[in-house]
Amino acid sequence: MKEAMIYLDNAATTFPKPECVYRAMEEAGRNYGVNAGRGSYALARKASAVIEETREWIKCLSGAAAVAEVVFTPSATVACNQVFGGLEWKKEDVVYVSPFEHNAVMRVLRLLQKRYGFAIEELALKEESSEMDLEKIRFQFLRKKPTVVAVTHVSNVTGYILPVEEVAKLAAEQGAVVAVDGSQALGLVPICLRNLPVDFYIFAGHKTLCGPMGTGGFLQSGRIVLKPFLAGGTGSRSLDLEMYSDVTGLEPGSLNVAAIAGLRAAVAELCGEDMGQMWESRTEFCSASRGERPEEFCRKAEEFAWEKAAEVLEREQRMAGYLIDRFEKIPGVKLYLPEDRKRHAGIVAFNVEGYQASEVGMLLDEDYRIAVRTGYQCAPLIHKYLRTGEFLGVVRVGVGRFTTEEELEALADAVREIAEG
């Protein structure tokens, strides 16, 4: 009998999910897996209520203002298309991106650039530490005023936690639209969006939130109204052929009720039992009228969520540090890390001298049953700074909520054997 696989590709998607996620999805599929927002019967109202509750959990987790709105999409990639595709563009616009952006951002912007002709500039990086250079970014914005600033919250290649708060404030001083890709961050890195000038915060339900695939979306502050990018049925205004720009209009088609129920369970599990009990005792919280959020409840809920995310981050940093300590003792292993370890999440990128990244990944899979990700991680800009060309990318370890020290020890032993030939 083969040994169980060690799964260390959690930056791609967390696996396994908490048991409550599987239970919630099965319950939804069996008991109220109907079309939400399309019927006045009890099951449709139940499905709608779960969706609205999930919006509120996401708001609490992100510290979003009462006026913020959560838009659900099938993935963060679709969310990026809706956000950037929904902006008004002109040829004179200047878009700044961090060198850490994923192709979910870069390919969308490139497609729009070919259509509208605007400029795309990279935000300044300290090449010696692979961290953002805020002083140079300030100068960049003064030299060439930004129209839109797109910045990822956590690099999916190196695990670097970018200073999104500082970048957002610099961008807002210039009146720019600020979009943050939080796919690797929400539920892991504490954030309070109502204190930040972020117009759009994009999330992926199946990554650090530990929800199912098929869930994603974005939070919007309400400062910018997106034009319709996708069109279709919404269950309302059925005689009107024009799409509209409120939340319902931004969610055409049938929402994945079972997946969103799983996401709700994942966020509730992340926030903990105390917050769950407080949630169950709430009054007039999830009403038919979206936006009724008792401020005292919300403040306490956001505090719980902040503390729980901080706990998850601290554990991932500790586990990543455990692995890094072992890798640093192996001759021939090259690590790609931010200089400030406090700004490092649970992603460890490395290479082994004499091997291409894909060769290391293949050996780990076939000889040791360890699953990692290899290559360029859909991040086209950062690798020229990391100088990974000779390795054809990196080997990426994604620490997850259920990763153990024993699993990381097994990985370190395997990499040592590979490095020793």
Image: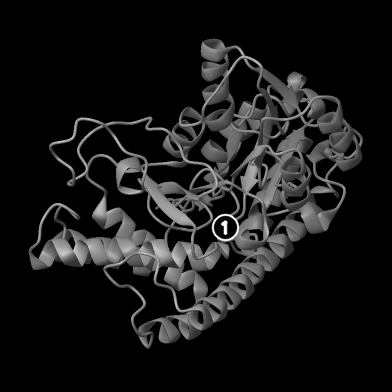
Q: Nearer the viewer, residue 383 or 400?
A: 383
Q: Amino acid at mark 1?
A: Gly
On the rendered structure, is 170 left or right of 257?
Answer: right
- Of the pair 63 and 227, the residue shown nearer to us: 227
Q: Quadrant of the C terminus?
A: top right
Which residue occupies the extreme left position in the image? 41
Secondary structure under the numbered disc 1 in the rendered image = loop
Q: Which residue is mark 1?
A: 400
Q: Nearer the viewer, residue 53 or 75?
A: 53
Task: Give the image quarter of residue 33.
Answer: bottom left
Q: Position of residue 232 (x, y in %)?
A: 23, 33
Image position of 145 (left or right of 375): right
Q: Is residue 263 above or below residue 385?
A: below
One can see residue 297 in this view: yes
Q: Is residue 397 left or right of residue 270?
A: right
341 shown above or below 313: above
- In the rendering, at what x and y percent does residue 376 appear? 63, 27
Residue under the image location 28 percent in, 65 percent down: 50
Here the colouring is one colour
Count of numbered circles in the view: 1
Left or right, 360 with respect to 245, comes to: right
Indicate whether 312 appears above or below 170.
below
Looking at the picture, how far across and down is residue 72, in whole percent? 38, 49
Query: Residue 191, can we see it?
Result: no
- Number of other residues with Cα within 10 Å of mark 1, as a class: few under 14, some 14 to 19, many 20 or more: many
In depth, the one of 266 and 52 nearer the eye is 52
Residue at horizontal 75 percent and vertical 38 percent from the top: 174
